[in-house]
Image: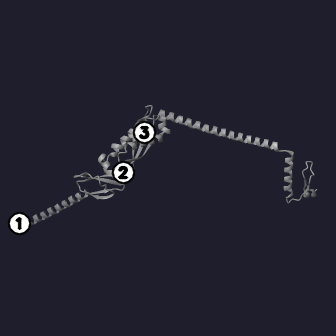
Amino acid sequence: MAMKREVGEEMVRGGARRRAGAWVAALSALSLLSGCIESIDPGKAAVLWTISQGTDTKTIYREGVQVIAPWNKLYIYDLRTQESRLSQHVLSVNGLAIQMDSSVLYKVQGKALPTLHEKVGPDYYHVLIAPYVMSEARKIVGRFSPSEIYSSQRETIERLILAGLREKLRNYPITVTGFLIRDVRLPRIIRVAIERKLTEEQNYQRMEYVLDVARKTAQKRRIEADGIQAFQKIVQENLTKSYLTWKGIEATEKIAKSPNTKIIIIGGGKTGLPVILNADSGAGH
């Protein structure tokens, strides 16, 4: 009886070990399988590196689920336009230290993704873009005065830095779509002086506008006065006795055709013009 009990217990222990081994095998298989599945999110793509051949330069892996061997690796890149912000110290043309905050907009060219992966790698922003942005910003900003950087030439500076970045990155599959200066911080005494100068310039331009309007108004009135004077001169030169007589005859003809009751005596006036009597008016006295 004791021997039978021992055999039974051994069989139970053996079954438990087999079940435990099966669970371990299942978990190992599941872990191995999960390492073979990679999910690529929308707007992204990937490059495959294999332990046997290195970077696969012919295939670009697009959005969705990809199954790979667990000893290989997918390097995922974002193909959408990205923004990165930088803050740096730059010097103006006169050596004044300026704190400038900027943004650079860029995107990776998906067709050349394997080339970027081979030449630079996933950290291409810190390896390429950020250093070039800081270099171009120092070079371009150093051509301008603090007042130009602070106000009037900001767009010009942005355009020049963008052109420089595109030139520096033209051999890489990276497209820089924009460069923006978000903020420029000058020493307070310089900023106050620039703002005062800008205010004075605006006041001067406003006064110039007011004076220009006054000058144009005066000129317009002089032209109108000259025109009236010329008209009066022409009228006075042509306002002869015969002309007035003729205009009187024309007016008489118009009155004669009027429906109002009247009596016209031809040649009754001292000037030889017709005399017009209103018959209704005479009847009322």
Instruction: From the top left corner, tell me how far across and down residue 204 is, in percent.
Output: 59, 36
Label pair 3/2, CB-CB below 8 angstroms: no
Quadrant into which the C terminus falls = bottom right
Q: Is residue 240 left or right of residue 148?
A: right
Q: Is residue 180 left or right of residue 279?
A: left
Q: Hey, which quadrant is residue 42 in on the image?
A: bottom left
- N-terminal of the pair, mark 1 or mark 2, is 1
Q: Residue at x 7, y 67 (%)?
A: 4
Element type at marker 2?
A: loop
Question: Mark 3 — residue?
Answer: 100
Residue 33 vertical placement versus 200 (above, below): below
Element type at marker 1?
A: helix
Front residue of this view, candidates 96 and 259: 259
Q: Residue at x 79, y 41 (%)?
A: 233
Question: Mark 2 — residue?
Answer: 109
Amino acid type, label 2: Gln
Rounded to the nearest angstrom, the CA distance separating label 3 from label 2 is 29 Å
Label annotation for residue 3: 1
Frontmost of labels 3 and 2 is 2
Q: Residue furthest top?
A: 94
Instruction: From the top left corner, tell me how far across and down residue 21 is, in percent.
Output: 16, 61
Element type at marker 3?
A: strand
Amino acid type, label 3: Met
Amino acid type, label 1: Met
Front residue of this view, candidates 228 and 18: 228
Rounded to the nearest angstrom, the CA distance separating label 1 from label 2 is 76 Å
Instruction: From the top left corner, tell me how far across and down residue 253 is, in percent.
Output: 86, 55
Front residue of this view, candidates 35 and 48: 48
- N-terminal of the pair, mark 3 or mark 1, is 1
- Please rate how many residues cluster around mark 3, counting C-alpha atoms within 10 Å: few if below 14, some from 14 to 19, many from 20: many
